[in-house]
Amino acid sequence: MEILSKGSLHKMNYTDLKKRFVEIYGEGEIRIFSAAGRVNLIGEHIDYNGGNVMPAALNLACTVIARPNNSEKIKLAFTTIDNREVLDINKLEQYKTLKYGNYQAGVAYVMQKEGFSIVGCDMLYDASVPFGSGLSSSAAIEVSTALTLATFSKESGNNKKDIDLVELAVLSQKAENQYVGVNSGIMDQFASAMGKAEHAIVLDCSTLKCQYVPLKLGDYSLVIANTNKPRSLADSKYNERRSECEQALSILQKSLDINNLCEMSPDIFTQNKHLLSGKIKDRAEHCVFEQDRVNKSVIAMTNGNLKEFGQLLNKSHQSLKDLYEVTGIELDTLAETAQKVQGCIGSRMTGAGFGGCTVSLVKTDMVDSFIEEVTKIYTKKIGYAPTFYNTTICNGAYEVKA
Ligand code: GLA
């Protein structure tokens, strides 16, 4: 499912990456691990409310070139920034404020606390997921780090556990919550680890059970567009939304036997929404109806009913704009412009919001004119252009045999 693009993506090939690794760390055996970024098709801001979400892993990924170094140090280098970091595996708690390397340190720290024996290693990171784009660049870093460290830990003989990608996703989420300080749900790390080529994941976030739905897009393509809005305040607003949902839940739990907001059907919510007021009510309403849209999307996708799926994407955006209030002028302009352009049957923001990307369903032979038209209108209104990515839906995390 190739999408035409006007955006250029950073991506080194494996031969160049190995060469770069040798320049930095010297000759020797080299291993390569990869974990994907993701696009969330629908089910936004409900993973931390026990909902079902529908993400898919992208070919935009974080690649780690690595090998154990027989020391007590994890050495970090990056292809896109000059910075180098050295982490002492006996003092992993002390790197929380690092600008580059805190995600890696957080993953190593959490894994160590959970019984993995972390071994020193040399690592080179190459990220093709654009940072701050809402396509889970941080989850891709976390999961690729976790897979690398778990593999070396197992091979060191100190840890006999088999590699379990779901476990690594959960550990990665813990690192983000407890070490980096963003209270994110499980969706991004799960998709980054468990994605399947040409399939959407339908993940029940209250049980971590998932099923894969083939993306039967027929004559249509998924087009991902970046607002290019510099993201600010996203993390604090995210944590604020999460706590608003917790407040809504605790009020409703006084009258209803529920464990999370997404357990309520639209009917039950409608009968009980008088218990809530103001923004708290709006946030809960978004969650309940977004869950309903995911359920309907799974049916629509399974039946190949793309028009219906497109309508659900539009409704999801509207609700994220009006009830959850996580869009902003850039995302609204991008999605609402797309919705009106010929050939597009649905468009919405994807990810946490407050900037980042949209995902649109566009007739494949009209993608070029779609990109042109949306770029023209968006640029005129916002003052700078969006970027369109050339993406395919791929597998999540794995060791690359190259
Ligand atoms: C971010 C978080 C996810 C999820 C989305 C919104 O990407 O990391 O856990 O909550 O926002 O759906």
Image: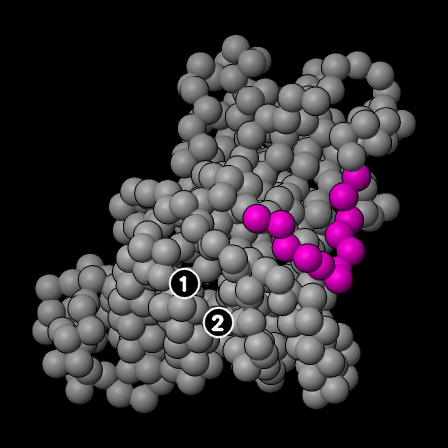
Q: Regarding mark 2 in the picture, which secondary structure is present there?
A: strand
Visible residue check, residue 214:
yes
Rendered position, 252 above or below 153? below
- Residue range in magenta is 1-12
Residue at image coords 76%, 84%: 383
Amino acid type for the residue under numbered disc 2: Ile
Q: Nearer the viewer, residue 66 or 313?
A: 313
Rendered residue at 55%/66% (across/down): 362
The Cα atoms of the two marked residues, 2 and 1, are separated by 8 Å
What residue did someone put label 2 on?
Answer: 345
Identify the residue at horizontal 37%, vertical 56% (top origin): 304
- Residue 9 painted magenta: yes
Instruction: Identify which amino acid the numbered label 1 is placed on.
Output: Leu
Image x and y of residue 25, in percent: 83, 25
* Label 1 C-beta lies within 8 Å of the nearest ligand 1 atom: no
Q: Is residue 96 visible?
A: no
Q: Say if the magenta span includes residue 123.
A: no
Ligand 1: does it lie within 8 Å of the C-beta at label 2? no
State the image coordinates of residue 119 (x, y, percent, origin top left).
61, 22
Decide: marks 2, 1 in contact (CB < 8 A)? yes
Q: Is 91 above or below relative to 377?
A: above
- At 44% from the left and 49% from the top, the residue drawn is 215
Question: In the image, is 125 to the left or to the right of 81?
Answer: left
Which residue is disc 1 drawn over? Answer: 306
Q: Secondary structure at mark 1?
A: helix
